[in-house]
Amino acid sequence: MQSYFLGIDFGTSGARAIAIDLENKIHAEVSYLFPSTALEERVNHWQHTLWQLLNQIPTEVRSHLQAIAINGTSSTILLCDKNGIPLYPPQMYNDTCDPASLELLTNLAPAGHPVLSASSSLAKLLGMSRTVDMASVRYLMHQADWLSCLLHGRPGLSDDHNSLKLGYDPELSAYPDWFHQSPLSQLLPLRPQVLRPGSKVSPIQHHLADRFDIPSECQICAGTTDSIAAFIASGANQPGMAVTSLGSTLVLKLLSPTRVDLADYGIYSHRLGNNWLVGGASNTGGAVLQSFFSTSELIELSQHIDPHQPSPLNYYPLLKPGERFPINDPFLEPQLTPRPEDPVMFLQGLLESLARIEAQGYRLLEAHGAPPLKAVYTAGGGAQNTVWQTIRQRHLQVPCSAAQHQQAAYGTALLAAHGSPL
């Protein structure tokens, strides 16, 4: 009897599910776009999306699922009660804490620690703890934790990829001693128990097994972040190989034998097998392009760009003030002028600037201990733009190619099937 393994990806604009067999062949793939909604309604739509994805998986696949894993956006957090029910709207991946909370955290955590960013999970938790009523809060849960909990029913569990920016040390497999200092000590009970990505947590809840015709023994596994799932899916498996995710944001991941953590530059490392995944996430990316051009316009205008001829325009494309990497500045202003009348010239200026920021990011990683860049795989919607790829290759000076598998859901399915593939 065939067995299937389901990976679910909750990204910035929608969600996708992919089912594979033990030989990594895809047997089902479905997607669902998030509706435009108020922040207060977002978690309800996440739950609705999860049920929609499960419903869309063909019954012949769903009825033979052996494991499910979920990824979510990094540092998207929820404060939940004892039953895992969110008490407040989520803090999203690109939200930041107030400057006073970040300054307080800077006095507690070691210099260069990944939590020392205004958008880290711990910075957001500390900031919220100073502004909202925490009396009923029992758990901090990342987006992937909460969605997984809907399936297995055990709140308070996470994975070391999502928990890195909460302060968890994957090298020690523990939270650090400095977490016991006030005022962080008051937050100790909220920290999730951390598991390795892909490890089995618990079977799916019986009522959901019955509702979706999923075997009651189907295991829900610890998840990961969307960008790490995209890396796992890409086929990159040697130090010096990297993946750039060109989605709503720009995420860089470079496989390295050496751990590099430098919060001053937005650099952090996740453990991946026997290596480290070093990188950072910029707030620039495809969302900026889509704020100026429709998808059809991006396709049409790109055809008129000569990617071998550099643009003289130098932008820093952001939707709003604030950047994480390669510049860690929560107040960095967007730079989108001068804007030429010719939309082709404007688009090329944006693409060149995004490529310049990407190259700056990889140079920064190497300067602080990561191996030299050998090759870049590209994931995300931007990977389809061949003109952009040529521009990027000119800036990066290494081979650029599309990832073997473009979807983060595929990498998460690999986690469900095999544990950590690397």
Image (tube, grey):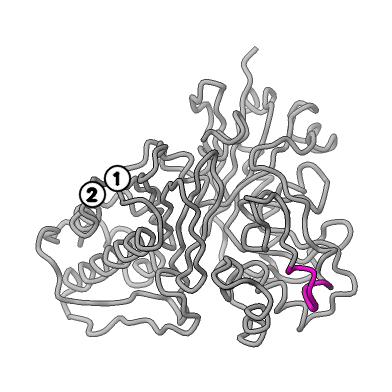
| Residue 375, numbered circle | 1
Position above or below: 279 against 326: above
Q: Where is residue 392 in the image (x, y as percent from the top left)?
A: 24, 57
In terms of sequence position, does the residue under pointer 2 or pointer 1 come before the other? 1
Q: Position of residue 399 (x, y in %)?
A: 23, 45
> Could you classify mark 2 by the number of other residues whose Cα lies within 10 Å: few (under 14), some (14-19), or many (20 or more)?
few
| Residue 15, numbered circle | none
Circle 2 — which element?
Answer: loop
- Give the distance between the C-alpha atoms of the residues marked 2 and 1, in whole angstroms: 6 Å
For the record, the magenta segment spans 178-185
Q: Answer yes or no: do the residues labelled 2 and 1 have beta carbons within 8 Å?
A: yes
The N terminus: image quadrant: top right
Q: Where is residue 201 in the image (x, y as percent from the top left)?
A: 76, 38
Position above or below: 191 against 417: below
Q: Position of residue 199 (x, y in %)?
A: 69, 37
Pick out the residue farthest to the bottom.
Answer: 100
Instruction: Please check the rendered image and state whether residue 289 is part of the magenta-colored stretch, yes or no.
Output: no
Q: Residue, x 58% and y 36% (percent of image)?
A: 420
Q: Residue, x 27% and y 66% (percent of image)?
A: 356
> Could you classify mark 1 by the number of other residues whose Cα lies within 10 Å: few (under 14), some (14-19), or many (20 or more)?
many
Q: Residue, x 39% and y 60% (percent of image)?
A: 365
Instruction: Please check the rendered image and state whether residue 180 is part of the magenta-colored stretch, yes or no.
Output: yes
Residue beneath disc 2: 398
Give the amino acid type for the residue marked by disc 2 in the picture.
Val
Residue 413 appears left or right of 173: left
Residue 122 appears left or right of 86: left
Give the amino acid type for the residue marked by disc 1 in the picture.
Ala
The quarter of the picture where residue 221 lies is top right
